[in-house]
Image (cartoon, rainbow, N blue to C red):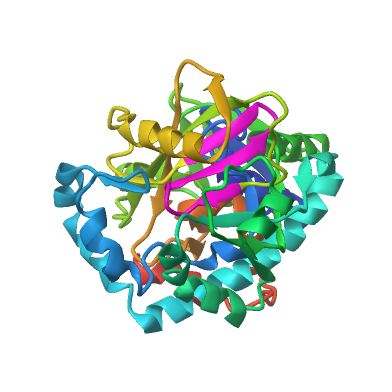
Amino acid sequence: MKNTVAVLGAGIVGVSCALELQRRGFDVTIFDRTGPGRETSYGNAGVIARSSLMPFNHPALWSTLPKLLKNRSASFRYDPLFLTKNLTWALKFLSNTRTSVFNETTAALDALIRLSTREHQRLLTEAGAAHRLRTTGWLFLYRSEAGFLGSRLSRDTFEKFDIATQVLDARELAELEPHLKPLFPRALWIRDTWSVDSPGQVVEAYARLFTARGGRIRQASIGALRRSNTSEAWQVTEDAGTVHEASRVVLALGPWTREFAKKSLGLAVPMAFERGYHMHYRAASGASLARPVYDTGGGYVLSPMEQGLRLSTGVQLADRAAPPNLAQLDLAEQAAREAFPLEGRLGKEAWLGSRPTLPDSRPIIGECPGRPGLWLAFGHQHIGFNAGPGTAALLGSMMAGETCAFDPAPFRPSRFLG
């Protein structure tokens, strides 16, 4: 019993944690209502990028906030009622734009993403999914010189952390991506970035590796989680009534963590939801992209995927279960058609997911204060796919009582739970 672990959540974070703990000799079972990689981990741009250390709440946010609050752009939308109900979170989120917090966050996320990149490389090989990996970097596109100059903080931060970049003019961009329309006078090539052609399939490959090594996955909704009254074990109760016991639990439910933690454990997690949409498109005959591109002025990312070109939208602050609002996707599609020869949509319905975000844009990684054996791994905002394996490596070291690859203090649960 002392080596048993129940991992709640089969996204990239949960599956990575299960694999890491299995590698360390734990007997692991994953629980999720759907199959691995079918929820939040499915719908993203598929990038494994050190440039993702930049949080949305950075010091330069204040200069763009008046425009964002007009609620008309493709990059940012919000539900006023949701913000009213989550005003404490919003104020804390804005307060964490301070330079001191920004410096701590970027340093912590850089260490986590560096570790995760190495772990992704190992897991992709072990899971037989290395063929999905591209090492061509990704591009930040600027529709004006002013837009490029306004990205100074990002570029300075990339330089500070030795992230390999290259500034491109219009001619150099055309040589690198000849099928982009001549709309962008400047671009920034983030060279040491990887991407995959199907993040959902990568998570499924990791899950197959886990089961091939003896792990178990139970597709079931979890109704309750509590500490046993007669032992030190944790009891995981499925909605159907089946009870499982484990000496330790890893809570990795992504955007579902807030309501589950409140209902089952009485924990108040200060989490909001940065919702996002994606849709796949066919490129016009002969047109292609060699890497993901982020149109900073258009507010979207266009990524070459197995299913076609995936158009991913920016941030929509709204309740996780709120009905879809496709205005943001329509604006992003309009901007993308200005930049690249897209043909029709390849699906009837847009994908919608929620990115779980804590007030300082850092995940919680570690043991829950006052609840021995309950380990937490959630709140990864936009970098869950990027940082999942690194989160697992960090958590595995802590659970095994070993020295971590770097100081985990910036991710400590006691920041918000105590």
**Residue 346 seen from this side:** yes
Judge whether 165 appears above or below 258 on screen.
Answer: below
Judge whether 195 appears above or below 111 on screen.
Answer: above
Residue located 64% across and 25% down the image: 284
Percent coordinates x, y for residue 71 in the rendering: 23, 46
295 inside magenta stretch: yes
144 inside magenta stretch: no
Q: Find residue 115 and report its image quarter.
A: bottom right
Percent coordinates x, y for residue 344 in the rendering: 53, 20
Q: Nearer the viewer, residue 336 or 275?
A: 336
Residue located 34% across and 37% down the image: 328
User: Which SS does the magenta portion mostly show?
Assistant: strand
Q: Nearer the viewer, residue 348 or 204?
A: 348
Q: Is residue 285 left or right of residue 355?
A: right
Percent coordinates x, y for residue 242 in the rendering: 51, 26
Instruction: Look at the image and give the residue range highlighted in magenta.
Output: 293-312
Residue located 63% across and 45% down the image: 46
